[in-house]
Amino acid sequence: MKFEDLKPQNEIAIKAAGPRYTPGIDPAAPNIEIDYLVDAVNALSIADGYRSKVSDLIAELDEALRTTHGTVDSVFKRRRITPAVIRYDLDQLLSIKKPDLIRKQVLMLRRRSKLVLGALTRESERFLSERLQLDDDKVHQGRSQFDSRQEYVRRLQSAISSADR
């Protein structure tokens, strides 16, 4: 089902509501677009915009995984839920057609994203702790190394946070 399929029903409801309840009908009027509601409606209607957004999330996560490859591998060495699993879940989301299955996949993706984000947050805190323990002589030399590792983790956190929304 697409938005276009609902247009006739919407027009009937708008006419029945009258001008008092439909100030947004005026194209020149300021309208507020609430992103999370638009995303929810797109997901429920399995609209092209939703699939496009998931594709964008996959591209963002792929880029983050490509640039952080060696930095966070040790964090997920013995874990079942990894950034690669999040990537797989997003890919699966693109192929699912039924709304109830999409909902289940999204809920699983959110649970898994929280686990991965928790592990990345702990790693980020570990990097910061190590950086703070450096001697003054080693601070300058080690700072750039820690900063780059921290940036890799932040980049991956950002991509996974986007997938969690």
Image (cartoon, grey):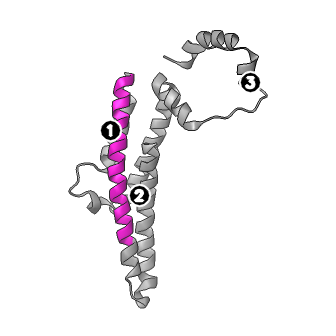
Q: Is residue 69 visible?
A: no
Q: Which mark is residue 67?
A: 2
Residue 154 % position (x, y): 44, 60
Disc 1 marks a residue whose amino acid type is Met
Splitting the image into 4 quarters, where does residue 70 fall? bottom left
* Left or right relative to 24: residue 43: left
The magenta segment: 99-127
Disc 2 marks a residue whose amino acid type is Thr
Point out the tag, 3 or 1, that comes first from the N-terminus.
3
Residue 29 % position (x, y): 77, 29
Q: Secondary structure at mark 1?
A: helix
Which residue in the protein does label 1 denote? 108
Q: Which one is in front in this view, the residue at disc 3 or the one at disc 1?
A: 3
Which residue is the extreme one toward the right? 28
Splitting the image into 4 quarters, where does residue 143 fall? bottom left
- Rounded to the nearest angstrom, the CA distance separating label 2 from label 3 is 48 Å
Splitting the image into 4 quarters, where does residue 155 fall? bottom left
Q: Which one is in front in this view, the residue at disc 2 or the one at disc 3?
A: 3
* Left or right relative to 138: residue 23: right
Q: Secondary structure at mark 2?
A: helix
Which residue in the protein does label 3 denote? 23
Residue at the (23%, 58%) spot, across then down: 77
Point out the tag, 2 or 3, that comes first from the N-terminus.
3
